[in-house]
Image: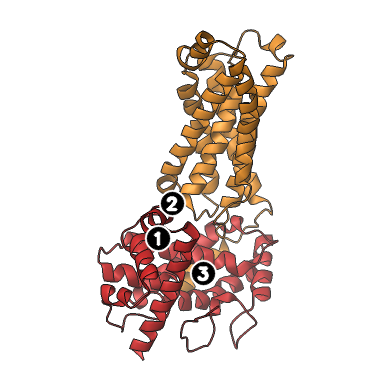
């Protein structure tokens, strides 16, 4: 199965929480700090928030072309949300997925609030939320890009993401199964990102 | 305010977090809501006068158990959807079980009665139980929405639907204290319809009420 990874200077997705890469805190360390904070240890909690901030900076930095101001705002909003809703963290589960689930939720909400009804931005939003490399340098002509994909993939993406149909509705319109639609969208988006990386280079 | 200043402020507020915060908040919210619903039942609808002898009969408990199953399933789904990583909660299939079992009883009853009684059960007998149960669900739903305020649901329509299931189930359970019907067909149609409506309303309200 083709595993197209996004072009990334660091060679891996930092938010996957693998072993410490230089200064990047590991999952184990973060979880320790979070657990300490949950016990009421202010020092651990402070260290946790400081450790989380650069993770959020890179997470949002790669996904927002608008630049520093928005990223800073989002980071602060996310830290506040993290603080207010830390009761939702289950200590039996890993910390990093919890962290990034919240970050992703805040990002989607940000896009929803600053909604721009422009098909080009729709597509770049989709790619940004999915975590692909900065697309702002590439000139996006939505239709031309989608036409480069196999018919099934471009159709699936048009239906579910640009026309806003549900997976079920798209499946019906295309005469294929629902999981077929999901797989096609997924592969199509990865292929699109691949095309865009080539263009940006 | 800079991020560093914000972090300083937040870490000054580093109160300990109970390990079972989700259970405590959701359970607490539901119990308070249920208490308010019970008051509504006693004061506005009225407990059935024969509640004492009725509580010795099977139908009384079947009604309560049917609704309580959905309340419990709702609670379990709400718990799962309170964490941000949850996309698809587990155990959804359980929703088919109580209705499926009750349907067996209802079909049995249906086949044993004549057309006139069938008509009476479906059409002529009151459906007022449905709006009453929906109204009774409101305090419990409010309780769950309160609980979500310090939790992190990311699939808001699903969280709202689960909250609807929990509150519809509890409302129907408490409603059964007022209701003297014993027919499985009646129970299946009215109670299930009411719970389904609260689920749908919850799903619609979720993205608006639970946003954070």
**Image quadrant where one finds the C terminus of chain B:** bottom left
The one nearer the camera, B108 or B88, is B108
Q: Which mark is residue A109?
A: 1
Q: Which mark is residue B27?
A: none
Q: Which mark is residue B211?
A: 2
Residue drawn where x is 59% and y is 33% of the image: B32
Q: Position of residue A197 (x, y in %)?
A: 39, 85
Q: Is residue B28 visible?
A: no
Q: Is residue A85 visible?
A: yes
Number of numbered discs present?
Answer: 3
Q: Residues within 10 Å of mark 2 (few under 14, many from 20)?
A: some
Which chain is indicated by disc 3? B
* Chain that is coloured red in the picture: A
Instruction: Give the vertical position of B149 relative to B60 (above or below).
Output: below
Task: Say if mark 3 contacts mark 2, CB within 8 Å.
Answer: no
Regarding mark 2 in the picture, which secondary structure is present there? loop
The one nearer the camera, B87 or A192, is A192
The extreme right residue here reads: B56
* Chain that is coloured orange in the picture: B
Disc 1 versus disc 2: distance between alpha carbons? 9 Å
Residue drawn where x is 37% and y is 60% of the image: A160
Which chain is indicated by disc 2? B
| Residue holding disc 3 | B7
Q: Residues within 10 Å of mark 1 (few under 14, many from 20)?
A: some
Regarding mark 3 in the picture, which secondary structure is present there? helix
């Amino acid at each position: 199965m083709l595993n197209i990874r996004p072009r990334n200077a660091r060679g891996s997705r930092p938010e996957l929480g693998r072993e410490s890469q230089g200064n990047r805190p590991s999952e184990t360390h973060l979880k320790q700090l979070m657990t300490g904070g949950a016990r009421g240890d202010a020092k651990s909690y402070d260290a946790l928030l400081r450790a989380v901030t650069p993770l959020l900076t890179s997470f949002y930095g790669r996904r927002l072309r608008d630049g520093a101001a928005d990223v800073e705002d989002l980071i602060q909003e996310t830290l506040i949300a993290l603080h207010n809703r830390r009761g939702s963290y289950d200590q039996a589960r890993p910390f990093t997925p919890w962290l990034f689930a919240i970050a992703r939720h805040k990002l989607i909400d940000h896009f929803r609030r600053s909604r721009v009804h422009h098909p080009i931005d729709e597509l770049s939003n989709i790619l940004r939320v999915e975590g692909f490399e900065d697309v702002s340098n590439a000139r996006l002509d939505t239709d031309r890009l989608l036409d480069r994909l196999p018919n099934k993939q471009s159709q699936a993406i048009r239906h579910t993401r640009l026309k806003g149909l549900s997976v079920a509705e798209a499946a019906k319109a295309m005469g294929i199964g629902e999981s077929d639609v999901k797989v096609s969208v997924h592969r199509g988006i990865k292929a699109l990102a691949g095309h865009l990386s080539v263009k940006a280079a | 305010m800079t991020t560093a200043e914000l972090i300083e402020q937040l870490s000054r507020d580093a109160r300990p977090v109970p390990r079972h915060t989700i259970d405590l908040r959701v359970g607490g919210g539901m119990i308070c809501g249920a208490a308010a619903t019970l008051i509504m039942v006693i004061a506005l609808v009225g407990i059935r006068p024969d509640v004492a002898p009725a509580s010795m009969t099977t139908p009384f408990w079947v009604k309560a158990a049917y609704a309580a199953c959905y309340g419990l399933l709702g609670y379990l789904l709400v718990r799962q959807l309170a964490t941000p990583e949850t996309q698809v909660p587990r155990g959804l299939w359980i929703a088919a079980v109580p209705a499926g079992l009750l349907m067996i009883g209802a079909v049995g009853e249906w086949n044993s009665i004549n057309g006139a009684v069938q008509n009476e059960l479906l059409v002529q007998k009151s459906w007022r139980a449905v709006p009453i149960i929906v109204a009774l669900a409101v305090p419990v739903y409010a309780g769950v929405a309160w609980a979500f305020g310090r939790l992190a649901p990311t699939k808001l329509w699903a969280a709202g639907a689960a909250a609807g299931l929990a509150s519809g189930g509890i409302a129907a359970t408490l409603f059964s204290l007022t209701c003297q019907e014993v027919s499985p067909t009646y129970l299946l149609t009215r109670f299930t319809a009411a719970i389904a409506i609260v689920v749908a309303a919850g799903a619609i309200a979720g993205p608006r009420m639970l946003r954070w």
